[in-house]
């Protein structure tokens, strides 16, 4: 799930045929009284295939594993995975160089100057409360500083990108030889943030720092809502927060949702089944991908995880 607001929010062997069939049965819609619970995952029915849309939390903790079993069943059923970016082909060195190119300040200015005296003073006060060494980010543009603050706070509470939904599924796909594709490149993703207005970037940094004292409790609630498919909670909290930042919401959520919906429509006459994994924020609300696909006449159903026997 992308709380900047949205950044954190954001090898196994294949199962045998009998196990796969059993797990696939768990993906079928079930009655509300069966003791199960919804998932942040939808199934879109195409002419010759079906596509799973899974909302992700990009960083998770050890205690958040294993993922709900129905997610692994969708993985087994899909011939290909699509994520926001092609994560199994990411080059860490190239990624760091790109982050430095787009996220660091390359002239004589500084984060302090870009924020302005009043907002930097507020950021400094918030950083001291959150115990974030803001001075170490003085060569960062505000959006990049916000992203680093968010990650620092999340990792303080045990959240790790290596434990996130995407990383977990990519590790399995690598072991299984299953193809992983991406809707966007890393340059495109970072470019969305880098092209935000300075005002929007400043808001991002203040928001990220302001969350420092409540991050642990907030993420506990978010992970619980995600795991239980509590769409109302996600809409009333994450989505409502993002909609309070119109430019950020338009660039990071709405415009990308529309682009991805077009791409997904093109896949609905494909003979292959797909598991598409994107930040959960992109799958909730009236501008979310499931509602956009449903509005275009496609059959979309939220899936459930049945109760354990």
Image: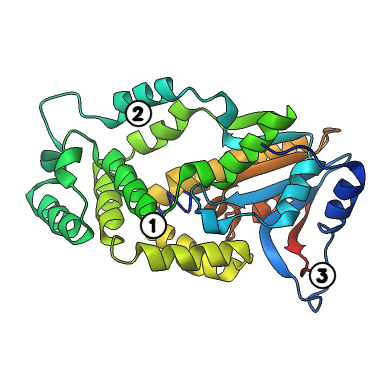
| Pointer 1 residue | 157
Distance of label 1 from label 3 (alpha carbons): 32 Å
Instruction: Residue 206: tell me if it is visible.
Output: yes
Distance of label 2 from label 1 (alpha carbons): 24 Å
| Pointer 3 residue | 309
| Pointer 2 residue | 99
Eye-nearest disc, 3 or 2? 3
> Do tag 1 and tag 3 residues touch (Cβ < 8 Å)?
no
Quadrant where the C terminus is found in the figure: bottom right
Front in this rendered view, residue 170 or 302: 170
On screen, residue 111 above or below 238 = above
Residue 116 position in % (x across, y down): 11, 46
Toward the right, the furthest residue is 18
Q: Secondary structure at mark 2?
A: helix
Q: Residues within 10 Å of mark 3 (few under 14, many from 20)?
A: few
Q: Secondary structure at mark 3?
A: loop
Work out whether mark 3 precedes mark 2 in sequence or the reverse, and give the earlier one: 2
Q: Quadrant of residue 224?
A: bottom right
Q: Residue at x 53, y 51 (%)?
A: 57
Work out whether mark 1 precedes mark 3 in sequence or the reverse, and give the earlier one: 1
Residue 284 position in % (x across, y down): 58, 58
């Amino acid at each position: 799930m992308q709380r900047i607001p949205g950044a954190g929010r954001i090898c196994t062997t294949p199962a045998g045929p009998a196990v796969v069939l059993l797990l696939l049965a768990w993906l079928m819609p079930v009655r509300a009284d069966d003791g199960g619970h919804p998932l942040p995952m939808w199934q879109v029915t195409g002419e010759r295939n079906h596509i799973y849309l899974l909302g992700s939390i990009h960083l998770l903790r050890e205690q958040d594993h294993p993922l709900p079993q129905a997610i692994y069943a969708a993985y087994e059923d899909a011939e290909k995975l699509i994520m926001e970016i092609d994560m199994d082909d990411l080059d860490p060195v190239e990624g760091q160089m790109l982050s430095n190119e787009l996220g660091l300040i390359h002239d004589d200015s500084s984060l302090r100057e870009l924020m302005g005296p009043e907002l930097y003073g507020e950021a400094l006060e918030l950083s001291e409360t959150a115990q974030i060494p803001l001075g170490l980010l003085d060569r960062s543009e505000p959006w990049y500083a916000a992203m680093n603050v968010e990650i620092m706070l999340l990792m303080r509470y045990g959240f790790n990108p290596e434990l996130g939904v995407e990383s977990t599924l990519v590790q399995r796909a690598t072991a299984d030889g299953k193809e992983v594709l991406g809707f966007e490149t890393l340059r495109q993703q970072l470019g969305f943030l880098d092209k935000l207005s300075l005002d929007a970037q400043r808001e991002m940094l203040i928001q990220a720092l302001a969350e420092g004292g409540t991050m642990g409790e907030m993420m506990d609630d978010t992970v619980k809502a995600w795991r239980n498919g509590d769409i109302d909670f996600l809409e009333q909290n994450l989505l409502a927060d993002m909609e309070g930042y119109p430019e950020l919401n338009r660039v990071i959520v709405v415009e990308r949702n529309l682009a991805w919906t077009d791409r997904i429509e093109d896949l609905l006459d494909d003979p292959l089944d797909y598991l598409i994994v994107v930040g959960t924020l992109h799958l909730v609300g009236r501008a979310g991908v499931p509602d956009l696909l449903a509005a275009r006449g496609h059959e979309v159903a939220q899936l459930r995880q049945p109760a354990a026997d």
